[in-house]
Amino acid sequence: MQKIREFILALPGEYKATRNNSNAVGIYTGKAVNNSKAISHIAIRDPVFIRNVLIPFFDSLVFRSKKGLDYND
């Protein structure tokens, strides 16, 4: 999960001034509801990061499945 976070933070875009801000991309762990298995997820909560880095990254990808249609919607 840490390497995925590092990859996301290393994406090019207009967010360099606060790119190392730990609040932009966070890793959270816990337990699933009614389950004893541990879970982890990555949350990107900074709208500026999403708009200026993440969306342009996804726009540059070529989807080879119906997920591309879902993304465009």
Image (cartoon, rainbow, N blue to C red):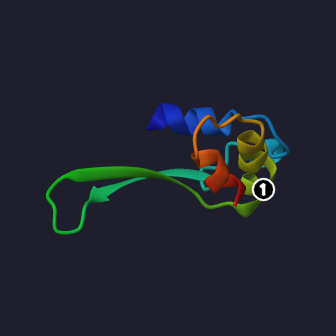
> Where does the image place residue 18, in percent across and percent down from the top left?
76, 48
Residue shown at 82%/40% (left/top)? 13
> Where does the image place residue 28, in percent across and percent down from the top left?
41, 54
> Where does the image place residue 12, in percent across and percent down from the top left?
78, 34
Residue carrying label 1: 51
Up/down of 24 relative to 58, above or below: below
Up/down of 52 relative to 2, above or below: below
**Front-most of residues 63 and 47:** 63
Side of 69 relative to 15 (left or right): left
Residue shown at 62%/39% (left/top)? 8
Q: Quadrant of the N terminus?
A: top left
Instruction: Tell me which amino acid carries mark 1.
Output: Arg
**Front-most of residues 19 and 56:** 56
Residue shown at 65%/37% (left/top)? 63
| Residue extending farthest bottom | 34
**Is the residue marked by circle 1 packed among few (<14), some (14-19), or many (20+) residues within 10 Å?**
some
Up/down of 60 relative to 41, above or below: above
Residue shown at 65%/39% (left/top)? 9
Side of 25 relative to 3 (left or right): right
Side of 25 relative to 32 (left or right): right
Looking at the rendering, which quadrant does residue 34 occupy? bottom left
> Where does the image place residue 62, in percent across and percent down from the top left?
70, 34
Q: Quadrant of the C terminus?
A: bottom right
